[in-house]
Image (cartoon, coloured by chain):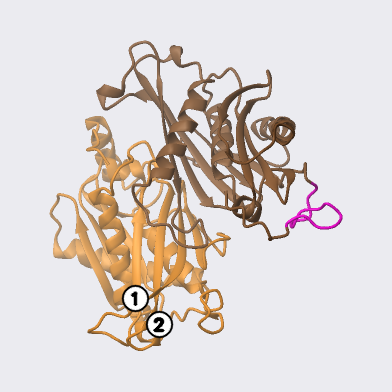
């Protein structure tokens, strides 16, 4: 984390730069069926993050070497569009995208009933169209909705939120400034029905008490976001 | 893109349809799908557009960078057009380094815009020999149901026309709109079932043969042509689609106003 220290991001009333209280989540809208040629898809706008996810499959797994005789594999490609950030991102190979693709795949493979589709693959393409902060969380959450939209059986949908710490205050769902200048970042992937976790990363500096608070914020936020996901899949008002 | 398997049944069906002057979705030979154009839709881009043509959806985003002008052209900035078709756009697109198909797409769209002269590269110079703007147009496919070429070209020129030069961010003066003096428009034709059709869908592309892309500027000036894929066409066939392209480009130019 940057830890620039003197950037003041919490005002005297305890409110954050975008007017949120420490435990508040940014506004979220979710839409399904946005990629008409895909088997399932989702567009999620979270603050000024925007992710579009398409799911294809289950389909034949190739190259053959990725095939598993007893189950399906999930092929996740997370990518940030060149115009998704303040400074243009050069397209092409990128270590950060590779890592995020991998941890997203690990999370999704933990919930999808892979044994139902031996020797096949399910392709999940995550495109970040606009990035604010927490794009890996938005990508993973939107991917869960897209998988559900594609009718792929899962034990639960993953809801991912990142909390952290700025100016020694633990805050939920970091925005761009808080992510850049804050002191800690704890993204988690929660299964709302059981409270179990399938995704966890962290960097920065948190005391045991702060860690507990950030953890609780994430779980609470995940429950709120889950409601919106279910609503969107049912064709609710905000979809 | 891996080499697609073309079902013979599809080819035969497309042939039968052509004989009856019909198409898979019931369109006429030169009838395009419904087009929807939105601009200013990407919060992080300096110019942007989204084009929907039937089930084909593309985004275009414009970003600016400061560059040192090339020594042989000290008074000029640059224009770059880059195209990525990532696996999100369809099951036939795969991850990995840019495929020849997506490189061709980007280059054909780039030529149409560049050669029309709609952007004056001399205007992009800030300090001769030292500082100039590089305009980067990124084309991004979301859903490919055929004819990405036309969708990209339309989104590209619309995004450029909506772009604001972020001079304040780079501390080189005041923000101002990017000057785009012309409206080059592309029309693409695919040989399907033995005759050319306008605005082919993915299935028509899959079961069709060669394709021809025509970019016309204001006053019907020709700015770029491209013949792609295996196939033979006659001068008469070309004359026919050129006539249609003139009319269609004029209609699409209106769409941008």
Magenta extent: A9-21
Is there any visible trace of residue A39 in the rendered image?
no
Report crowding for label 2: few under 14, some 14 to 19, many 20 or more residues within 10 A (C-alpha). Answer: many
Measuring 32% from the left and 86% from the top, which residue is drawn there?
B129
Assess whether mark 2 and mark 1 are in contact (beta carbons under 8 angstroms): yes
User: What's the mark number on residue B124?
Assistant: 2
Q: Is residue B198 above or below residue B94?
A: below
Measuring 25% from the left and 36% from the top, which residue is drawn there?
B4
Q: Does the magenta stretch include residue A18?
A: yes
Q: In this view, does B175 lie above or below A188?
A: below
How far across and how far down the image is residue B36, in percent? 52, 58
How far across and how far down the image is residue B83, in percent? 35, 57
Q: What element carries label 2?
A: helix
What is the chain identity of the residue bearing mark 2? B
Report crowding for label 1: few under 14, some 14 to 19, many 20 or more residues within 10 A (C-alpha). Answer: many
Q: Nearer the viewer, residue A208 or A57?
A: A208
The picture's colour for chain B is orange
């Amino acid at each position: 984390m940057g830890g620039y220290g003197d950037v003041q991001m919490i005002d005297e009333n305890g409110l954050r730069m975008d007017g949120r209280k420490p435990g508040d989540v940014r506004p979220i809208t979710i839409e399904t069926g946005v990629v008409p040629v895909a088997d399932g898809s989702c567009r999620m706008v979270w603050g000024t993050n925007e992710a579009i996810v398409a799911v294809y499959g289950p389909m034949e797994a190739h190259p053959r070497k990725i095939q598993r005789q007893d189950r399906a594999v999930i092929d996740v490609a997370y990518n940030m569009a060149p115009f998704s950030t303040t400074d243009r991102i050069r397209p092409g190979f990128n270590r950060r995208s590779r890592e995020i693709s991998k941890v997203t795949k690990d999370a999704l493979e933990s919930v999808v009933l892979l044994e139902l589709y031996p020797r096949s693959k399910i392709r999940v393409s995550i495109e970040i169209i606009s990035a604010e902060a927490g794009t890996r969380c938005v990508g993973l959450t939107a991917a869960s909705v897209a998988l559900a939209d594609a009718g792929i059986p899962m034990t639960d949908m993953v809801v991912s939120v990142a909390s952290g710490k700025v100016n020694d205050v633990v805050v939920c769902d970091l925005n761009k400034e808080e992510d850049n200048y804050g002191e800690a970042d704890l993204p988690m992937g929660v299964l709302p029905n059981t409270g179990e976790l399938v995704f966890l990363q962290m960097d920065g500096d948190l005391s045991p008490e702060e860690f507990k608070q950030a953890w609780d914020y994430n779980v609470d936020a995940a429950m709120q976001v889950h409601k919106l996901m279910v609503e969107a899949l049912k064709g609710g008002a905000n979809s | 893109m891996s080499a697609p398997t073309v079902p013979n049944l599809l080819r035969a069906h497309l042939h039968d349809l052509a004989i009856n002057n019909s198409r898979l979705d019931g369109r006429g030979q030169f009838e395009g799908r419904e087009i929807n154009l939105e601009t200013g839709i990407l919060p992080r881009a300096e110019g942007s557009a989204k084009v929907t043509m039937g089930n084909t959806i593309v985004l275009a985003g414009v970003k600016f960078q400061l560059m040192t002008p090339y020594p042989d052209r000290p008074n000029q900035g640059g224009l770059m057009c880059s195209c990525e078709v990532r696996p999100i756009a369809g099951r036939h697109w795969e991850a990995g380094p840019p495929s020849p198909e997506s490189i061709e797409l980007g280059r054909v769209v780039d030529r149409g815009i560049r050669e029309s002269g709609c952007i004056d590269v001399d205007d992009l110079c800030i300090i001769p020999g030292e500082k100039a703007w590089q305009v980067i147009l990124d084309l991004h496919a979301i859903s490919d149901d055929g004819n990405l070429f036309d969708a990209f070209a339309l989104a590209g020129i619309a995004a450029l026309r909506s772009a604001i030069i972020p001079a304040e961010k780079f501390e080189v003066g005041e923000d101002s709109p990017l000057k785009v003096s012309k409206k080059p428009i592309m029309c693409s034709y695919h040989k399907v079932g033995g005759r050319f059709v306008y605005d082919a869908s993915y299935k028509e592309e899959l079961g069709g043969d060669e394709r021809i892309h025509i970019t016309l500027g204001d006053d019907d000036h020709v700015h770029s042509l491209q013949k792609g894929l295996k196939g033979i066409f006659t001068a008469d066939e070309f004359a026919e689609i050129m006539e249609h392209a003139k009319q269609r480009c004029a209609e699409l130019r209106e769409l941008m106003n």
